[in-house]
Image: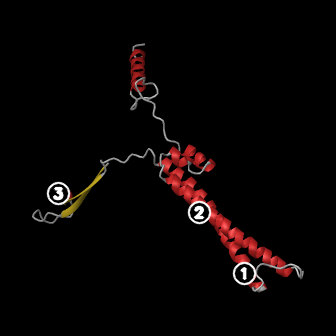
C-alpha cells in the first residue's frame, strides 16, 4: 500500500500535465476570437462557370470583366461573319454540283474547286473562332480559381535575404593548417 500511493499520485500528476500542456489554444472556444471568413476558390470557380465574369466579381477583380466580355463579343462577331461567308459559298457550291440548269449560283465566274476551297476556308475560320470562345471560357474559369486561391495570400515585408562576408572560426574546421590563415566565406541569411 505504501508503494501504491506514490504511483497513483505520479499518474494523476502526469494526467494533469498532459491535459494542460497543449501547445495551441482552440480558437473555437475563445469567445473573443473573430470568425474569419475564408475566400472560397470553389465558389469562385462555380460562379465563373455559371456566368463568365462572376468569379472575377467575387474576387473583386472588376477590371477583368470588360476584357472577358470584349473577348466574347469579338469572337462571336467573327463567328457570325465567317458563318455568313461559309453559308454563301456552301449554297453556291451546292447549286453548282446539283446539275440543275435552272439554278444560278452567286459566283458564276468561280470554278467548282475554288468554291469548294472557299467553303472549306470559311468553315475552318468559323470553327477556329468557336474553339477560341471555348478557350476564353476555360481561361475565365482558371483565372477566377487562381485569383481566389491567392486572395488570402499574405505578402509581407518581412521576407528578406541578407548576404555578407564571413570569417570562419579556424577551430571549427578540421583541416585548418595554421591559425594565421582564416578562411573567408559568404554568409546567406533568409528571414521569414
Q: Picture quarter containing residue 152?
A: top left
User: Would you place residue 107 above or below residue 127 in this image?
Assistant: below
**For the residue carrying disc 1, how many other residues have a C-alpha within 10 Å: few (<14), some (14-19), or many (20+)?**
some
| Residue found at x 40% / y 24% | 32
In 3D space, how far apart are the residues under numbered discs 1 and 3 (Cα atoms)?
84 Å
Q: First in sequence: mark 1 or mark 3?
A: 1
Task: Name the disc covering residue 117, or none.
Answer: 1
Number of residues whose C-alpha sits closer than 10 Å to that of mark 2, classed few (under 14), some (14–19) or many (20 or more): few
Assess whether mark 3 and mark 2 are in contact (beta carbons under 8 angstroms): no
Q: Is residue 105 above or below residue 25?
A: below
- Colour logic: secondary structure
Point out residue 47 in the picture as x, y percentages from the top left corner: 59, 46
Cβ–Cβ under 8 Å for marks 1 and 2 = no
Observer-side mark, 1 or 2, equals 2
Q: Secondary structure at mark 2?
A: helix
Q: Nearer the viewer, residue 98 or 19?
A: 98
Ranked by sequence position, the earlier of labels 1 and 2 is 2
Q: Decide which of 85, 47 is in the foreground and name it.
A: 85
Tags 1 and 3 touching, CB below 8 Å: no
- Pick out the residue farthest to the left: 180
Q: Which numbered disc, 1 or 3, marks the residue closer to the eye?
A: 1
Label drawn at residue 99: none
Disc 2: which residue: 74
Mark 1–mark 2 distance (CA, rounded to whole Å):
25 Å
Q: Residues within 10 Å of mark 3 (few under 14, many from 20)?
A: few
Q: Which residue is mark 3?
A: 171
Q: Residue at x 85, y 81 (%)?
A: 97
Query: x, y (%) of residue 191?
Result: 29, 50
Nearer-N-terminus badge (2/3) = 2
Give the number of the mark in front: 2 or 3: 2
Identify which residue is drawn at 45% across, 46% down: 151
Indicate left or right for 178 with 23 as reference: left
Amino acid at each position: 500500500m505504501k508503494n501504491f500511493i506514490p504511483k497513483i499520485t505520479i499518474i494523476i500528476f502526469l494526467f494533469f500535465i498532459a491535459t494542460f500542456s497543449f501547445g495551441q489554444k482552440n480558437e473555437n472556444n475563445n469567445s473573443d476570437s473573430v470568425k474569419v471568413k475564408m475566400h472560397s476558390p470553389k465558389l469562385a470557380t462555380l460562379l465563373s462557370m455559371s456566368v463568365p465574369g462572376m468569379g472575377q466579381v467575387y474576387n473583386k477583380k472588376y477590371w477583368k470583366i470588360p476584357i472577358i466580355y470584349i473577348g466574347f463579343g469579338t469572337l462571336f462577331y467573327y463567328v457570325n461573319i465567317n458563318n455568313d461567308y461559309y453559308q454563301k459559298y456552301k449554297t453556291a457550291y451546292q447549286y453548282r454540283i446539283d446539275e440543275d440548269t435552272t439554278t444560278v449560283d452567286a459566283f458564276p465566274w468561280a470554278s467548282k474547286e475554288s468554291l469548294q476551297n472557299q467553303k472549306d476556308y470559311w468553315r475552318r475560320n468559323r470553327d477556329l473562332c468557336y474553339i477560341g470562345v471555348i478557350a476564353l471560357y476555360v481561361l475565365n474559369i482558371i483565372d477566377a480559381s487562381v485569383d481566389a486561391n491567392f486572395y488570402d495570400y499574405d505578402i509581407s515585408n518581412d521576407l528578406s535575404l541578407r548576404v555578407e562576408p564571413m570569417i570562419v572560426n579556424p577551430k571549427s574546421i578540421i583541416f585548418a593548417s595554421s591559425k594565421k590563415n582564416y578562411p573567408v566565406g559568404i554568409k546567406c541569411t533568409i528571414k521569414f
